[in-house]
Amino acid sequence: MLYKNGVDLFEQLNDFLGKNTECSIYVPYIKLDALQGLATSTTKINMVVVRWEPRDLITGASDLEIYPYLKERGITLYRNPRLHLKAFVANYKSAFFGSANISQRAFNYPEIDKYNYELATTIGDLKLEDRLYFNMIEAESILITDQIYEQIKAQLPEKVKQFPKEDDFSIHISYPDKDFSIASLPMTYSVDTLSRIYETHESIHEVELNCAMHDLAIYGIPLGLPLPAFKERLKTSFFNHPFIRSFLEYVDSDGQIYFGTAKDWIHKNCSDVPTPRKWEITENIQILYRWIVKLSDGKYQVDRPNHSERLFYSNISN
């Protein structure tokens, strides 16, 4: 069924959001007043991805003020200048999508006479290829923090002076390398688990499947490769990832690393703001150890001398 702006689009979208426990929004242009009409008490929005090109903010196609509004509600905001699709995704299982951005004219909310003609529809069964597509978008997006928000806000007045004299311009943003965020580390319990899901598309539970999709997106692996090609590409991408490469360079300097030291290094070098507490990254390091051992083909091993896990070169004596 097609939902039509000015008839039932806004009502159907709110109904879709209200029926689901966790929804992610991918929309290039977002206006605060229309967003406020969606983020009701019954709606479980957990993440928003917006385009936020400088021109969007200067012309008023998008509002900078959506960041503090979302932050106050515990909703994370990401920026991706390549974004053009408009989709509302529930639990990575179903989606409401169409032509509408989040604005008064696109939703006819609050009601106006000259609203846009927009269409939307829903799909109730997202395939793995569809889920991975959204994960890929998230993987290359930049998390908006207070620091980045203030950088953009400070530069806009100068960009307004230039507009429209320049056809193309950008805002310079310095931000911690997202390749060094905790989210850029593997999440699937083991490489064998990821390989099984990749080959069979079957998982024990939804969390396991979400972790697998995260890892395929982080390491840039498409679905549909023969299993040997998948494993070889995973190995190459994993060991070439900046966070993994930097961590192993530190390990190589001494030939070994104990679990507590690994936790200290990850905690010190991750770019997350705020920095997670050390106990929160214990499982991340356990998974990281499993992946390194499995993908290194025996170059690294793990043992437990002195009651602490140690990652070491296989040719280093115990």
Image (cartoon, grey):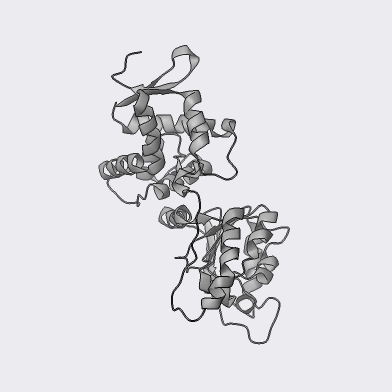
Q: Residue at x 33, y 42 (%)?
A: 240
Q: Position of residue 301 (x, y in %)?
A: 35, 23
Q: Is residue 101 visible?
A: no
Give the position of the C terminus as an image quadrant: top left
* Quarter of the view holding residue 102: bottom right
Pick whichever, 256 or 195, lies toward us: 256
The answer to whether 175 appears left or right of 66 in the picture is left
Q: Residue at x 43, y 33 (%)?
A: 288
- Compared with 8, 146 (above or below) is above
* Quarter of the view holding residue 13: bottom right
* Quarter of the view holding residue 297: top left
Q: Residue at x 56, y 71 (%)?
A: 158
- Compared with 216, 160 (above or below) is below
Q: Position of residue 57 (x, y in %)?
A: 57, 71
Q: Position of residue 192 (x, y in %)?
A: 37, 34
Q: Residue at x 44, y 16 (%)?
A: 304
The answer to whether 164 appears left or right of 313 in the picture is right
Give the position of the N terminus as an image quadrant: bottom right
Q: Position of residue 8 (x, y in %)?
A: 64, 75
